[in-house]
Image (spheres, helix red, strand yellow):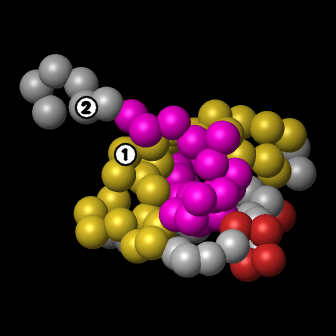
Amino acid sequence: MPVEQVPLSEQAHSLGPAQYGTPVRQAGEPLPVSAWIHTRKGHQLVDGVALAWTTKAARIRYIDGHGREGFAWVWAHAVTRSTPSAGE
């Protein structure tokens, strides 16, 4: 069953190439993270995975509070790498 996408009107603000810079390093495997995103409704902390990064930012795939999938480039200081829980 496909995951519903976050509607355009509720998507996180994503940095542009001039902001996140180069070189872009792709993750061999997605890295579990939590990240602060900014939407039209304000800021929210989401869980997700980092798919790529630069020295300034990370591209994340996140799940919003309604269980929908979104993607965004966010500043590196807004991202925290998650540690697996016991038993994972």
| Residue beneath the point at 55% across and 77% down | 23
Q: Amino acid at mark 1?
A: Pro
Task: Tell me, yes or no, if residue 55 can be seen here.
Answer: yes
Q: Is residue 58 left or right of residue 8?
A: left
Query: Does the stretch in magenta take in 66?
Result: yes
Q: Is residue 56 left or right of residue 30?
A: right
The residue wearing badge 2 is 84
Residue 5, x across and y down, in percent: 57, 67
Label 2: state its secondary structure: loop
| Residue beneath the point at 10% across and 25% down | 87
Task: Tell me, yes or no, if residue 59 can be seen here.
Answer: no
Residue 17, x across and y down, in percent: 73, 78
Sequence-first tag of 2 and 1: 1
Which residues fall within the magenta stretch?
A: 53-82
Q: Is residue 66 left or right of residue 36?
A: left
Residue 57, x across and y down, in percent: 63, 58
The residue wearing badge 1 is 32
